[in-house]
Structure formats: C-alpha cells, structure tokens
Image (cartoon, helix red, strand yellow):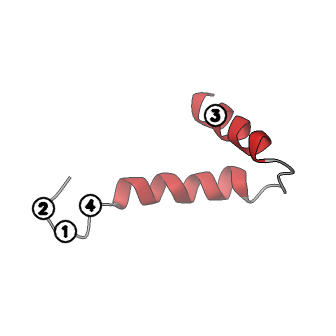
Amino acid sequence: MGTVGDCYDNAMMESFRDTLQLELLDTKQWKTRNQLANAIFEWIEC
C-alpha cells in the first residue's frame, strides 16, 4: 500500500473486483442473494 493519495492504493482491490465481475457476475442472473453468495464463495475458494 502506498501513501495517502497515492493512485495505486486501490489497484489490487479494483483488479479483484473487475475480474470477479467479468468471470462470475456478468455470466448469469442470480435469483437469490444466497445463490450469489455461494457462487462468489465457490469462485474464490476454487
């Protein structure tokens, strides 16, 4: 992590979020919040 105001502070988290969005969240519509939570858990752990 950098200093306050450093443009790289959030780069790792933004990269993770973007990858999650592309590989999992944009692939289908989730009917329940529980289904989504389970899919995210499985995606991270596997």
Above-or-below relation of 30 to 42? below
At label 1, counting other C-alpha atoms closer than 10 Å, the crowd grade (few under 14, some 14-19, many 20 or more) is few
Q: Nearer the viewer, residue 8 or 36?
A: 36
Q: Position of residue 15 (x, y in %)?
A: 46, 57
Q: Which mark is residue 44?
A: none
User: Residues at badges 4 and 2 in contact (C-beta under 8 Å)?
Assistant: no
Q: Would you name the residue on which mark 4 appears?
A: 9
SS class, disc 2: loop
Q: Which mark is residue 3?
A: 2
Extreme residue toward the left, this view: 3
Q: Position of residue 8 (x, y in %)?
A: 26, 63
The disc, 4 or 2, on the residue closer to the chain's N-terminal end is 2
SS class, disc 1: loop
Q: Would you name the residue on which mark 1 appears?
A: 6
Residue 41 figure quarter: top right
Q: Position of residue 6 (x, y in %)?
A: 19, 68
At label 3, counting other C-alpha atoms closer than 10 Å, the crowd grade (few under 14, some 14-19, many 20 or more) is few
User: Residues at badges 1 and 2 in contact (C-beta under 8 Å)?
Assistant: yes
The disc, 2 or 3, on the residue closer to the chain's N-terminal end is 2
SS class, disc 4: loop
Alpha-carbon span between mark 4 and mark 1: 6 Å
Amino acid type of the residue tagged 4 in the rendering: Asp
